[in-house]
Image (cartoon, helix red, strand yellow):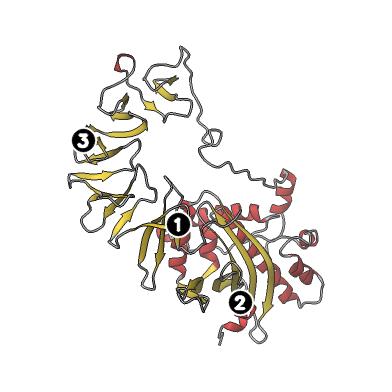
Amino acid sequence: GNILIPPIYDQAYDFHEGLALTGNTNDKGETSYQLIDLSGNVRIQIQDTPALLDSQPACGLIKYNNCQSGQCCYLSTTGKEGLFLPDSIREAFRFRHNAAIIHTDHGAGLIDREGKLLIAPTYEEGFIVGNDRVCLRTGNEWQLADFEGNSLGEAKKSYERISTFYPSGLAIVRSGTQCRWMNRQGKPADNRTYHCIAEDPSALQLVPQVFVRKNTKTENEENNSANRPEKKGTVSASSSITASASSSTMASSSEKSSPGNDPSAGKPHTTCIISSDEWKNIGKQNPFYAEARKILSGKLAETDAENRQVILNYVEHLRTSYTTKDIDFLTQLFSEEALIIVGKVIRSTPRTDGKYLPQHQVEYNIKSKRTYLERLKVLFKQNKEINLLFSDFKIMRHPTQEGLYGVTLRQKYSSDLYSDDGYLFLLWDFRDEATPLIHVRTWQPRMLDDRTPLPEDEIFNIRNFNLQ
């Protein structure tokens, strides 16, 4: 659990062959990359040219495409001269076992680390499956071959499919309705055949195993939920998970009837309503506990209490909308002119004289609703699992403007590729009771560095915005 390399990079990728690709972005949005070793020392500073870099070194090379010329190239991780492929090669892939698949206008082939052809590009597709082993496809038939293109196995037999080779040294092959195990020589491992051999990447430990425990409801509870009266144009449901499904269902039906299938056109504004009895039963560890007790105390005006309860339900649905990737709900939630502010910590360069510590400040970027949602769609596609944890939840009613509320909370975000911890602020507008909207969303990092929290007086709240 000890930090070996301080988190000073805007981008960083996993280590391979003792090296990792890292990058930092300047004020102009330009990112410079370097390869660092396991101690964090820079091994190679990558030249700042318009290129698409692979994130993983392999066989002492890291692949990139020159954006200007379109040329496929490989950079040497040892500082030696790289490998530049001819223009006839339209695409090249990461090296494995000192060989790489390439594609030309004529088909797929194989090259070595010097760029020399090992297998002529006459195949439709190919992939490397092990040391001196490659699978090649012609039409709908796959063959196992060595790195010289010689077919292996019994009578050079072809298959409809060949899997990767597993640590046992066996691969799954399918021909017609039969599956069997094949060894690296292309021969059957035994005489048995199967109708199907199931491949489970989790069981094979090729991907992380993730276990999710979800609350389920009985059929009676669902029926009772459906019979509850609707309020303020919202959809009744007994839990936020059910509400997410309800929102998606309504969105789908709306898309069929709306002109041009505009995802946001003509959709009813939906959320879940958790009953007062259910709010009474939440535990003290629940992030909404303090606000829920305030609502149920009977000391608030009726309209104020109702608005706050809607906020509680919406915010819970907001959390699950990231888990369920419910982009339709998020599209409804933000107003078209919403102000979305995202902060990140900027560190100045340390002084070499040792007299001063580097200063830290937070830089804020403003995004439109469209830009923010487009970015979310990309994140939803890139990540299989996304989770949000809320705490320190507070609702503040505007002292003079009726129907405006500020919500502050601490948010811990985690996904397959990224995680952060910061403060979220939402400005709610209830002046149109049928469609409450968010006009402002801000996020600020909780820590400026490993030891310095964001000062409390810098955390955004409703007083930071001119609402006139």
Tell me if 440 is positioned left or right of 74 in this view. Answer: right
- Quadrant where the C terminus sits is bottom right
Question: Which residue is at the front of the view, 441 or 438?
Answer: 441
Residue furthest to the top in view is 191
Query: Which numbered disc covers residue 459?
Result: 2
- Residue 419, picture quadrant: bottom right
Instruction: Give the residue type that dot 1 points to.
Output: Ala
Q: Taking 191 as reference, is 297 left or right? A: right
Circle 3 sits on which residue? 117
Which mark sits nearer the N-terminus, 1 or 3?
1
Residue at 46% across, 75% down: 348
Residue labelled with disc 1 = 12
**Closer to the observer: label 1 or label 2?**
1
Instruction: Tell me if mark 1 has few (under 14), some (14-19) or many (20+) residues whose alpha carbon lies within 10 angstroms of its own.
Output: some
Asked if residue 228 is positioned above or below residue 62 in the image, the reply reads: below
The mark lying in front, picked from 3 and 2, is 3
Cα distance in 3D space between marks 3 and 2: 60 Å
Residue 148, horizontal then vertical, whole percent: 25, 27
- Quarter where residue 277 is shown: bottom right
Asked whether residue 124 appears in the rendered view, the answer is yes
CA–CA distance in space, label 1 to label 3? 33 Å
Residue 203: which quarter of the image?
Answer: top right
Q: Position of residue 335 (x, y in %)?
A: 51, 72
Q: Secondary structure at mark 2?
A: loop
Q: Residue furthest front?
A: 353
